[in-house]
Amino acid sequence: MTEKLGLLDRLAHGVVFGAEGYVFELERRGYIQAGPFVPEVVLDYPDAVRELHREFQRAGAEVMVALTYYGDRQKLKTIGREGDLEALNRQAVQMAREVAAEGDSLVAGNIANTWVYDHNNKEATSKVVRQIYTEQVQWAADEGVDFVIAETLDYLGEGLLALEVIKSFGLPAMITFASVQHELRDGYSYAEACKILENEGADVVGLNCTRGPETMLPILKQIRQAVSGYVAAQPVPYRTSDEQFSFQSLKEAGQERAFPIRLEHFLCDRFEMADFALQAKEMGVNYIGICCGAAPHHVRAMAEALGRSTPASRYSPDLSLHPMIGKNVSETDKQYLKFWKD
Ligand SMILES: [Zn+2]
């Protein structure tokens, strides 16, 4: 048996390709409630989580991210399941490990913005956040994660707390910000904050969630210029624009806010996400992935754009075999092609 390469070894060799968006996808499948978005599915329908891990791994993801996003003490309290906290966190990592072992994937622990941190009340809120992160990372470390992703953070201050806790367990740390605003809530630009995290010892820094390819790429460029280490980018597959630059702000004319359960109109197709993967790679992004809204077809197209062949590539499209738009269309069928807008 050869030893599995760790995150830093893989990054030293080239792009590491991840995939996330578990909460959104499992909400669409009927296993998570939109609103609280607490991953109760880990305990209630574990097979649904295993299945999605497998689908992402088959599609080329080389990181199985334990579904502990919003699985923290405060969040579980909001749905009255605080008593399930430890079981949920441990089981999520166990399942990620189980599926990762079927392939060659790394296992990532996952912590997120707590909605507790407040830079204007830093001392008191930092104490609570540190407790939340410490118990989650402790369980993740116990269950054998390879590294920890702290993500969708709105404050540099919260990112620094996450980093401190992850490092206290001796694990590699990937810290990524949400970018709902033009800068972080504690006033730092995303590039500035990434540089500070890097100086403090973060192994990978960057952005996840919130922005689609078009509006994430310009900030990634600034981050790439600001830091010398590894950069991560995991956008949402939605068509954000200069006017509506986050998926929280997307809105069709005359409609309610699209976030978070009316976003389909803005969904990127697999080609757009494949194109993002290529552009990010060319820009020098080291960890490329996808966030809320992701489905396995996006993931496979991105992996293939990065030059990889995945288990699911066995079923990658071959439209030349299609009876109407393929190479060998019968004379009978040809007369109807005008309706296919050939
Ligand atoms: Zn997301």
Image (cartoon, rainbow, N blue to C red):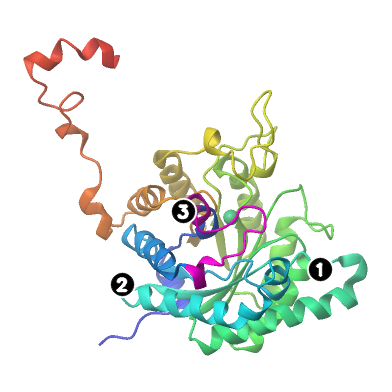
Q: Amino acid at mark 1?
A: Tyr
Looking at numbered disc 3 in the image, what kind of residue is underneath it? Lys
Determine whether the beta carbon of the residue marked 1 sits less than 8 angstroms from the nearest atom of ligand 1.
no
Q: Which residue is mark 2?
A: 103
Does 40 lie within the magenta span?
Answer: yes
Percent across and percent down for residue 90 are 53, 82
Distance in Å between CA atoms under marks 2 and 3: 24 Å
Would you name the residue on which mark 1 appears?
Answer: 117
Answer with the quadrant where ligand 1 appears in the image: bottom right
Q: CA distance from mark 3 to mark 1?
A: 33 Å
Quadrant of the image occupied by residue 76: bottom right
- 333 left or right of 241? left
Q: Residue at point 18% right, 23% down?
A: 324
Crowd band around label 2 with a 10 angstrom C-alpha radius: few (<14), some (14–19), many (20+): some
Could you say where residue 334 lies in the image, as x and y percent from the top left? 14, 14
The stretch of residues the image draws in magenta is 25-44
* Quarter residue 71 falls in: bottom right
Based on the picture, tell me whether residue 334 belongs to the magenta stretch.
Answer: no
Residue occupying the point 15% across, 34% down: 321
Q: Position of residue 144 (x, y in %)?
A: 48, 86
Q: Which mark is residue 281?
A: 3
Q: Main secondary structure of the magenta part?
A: loop
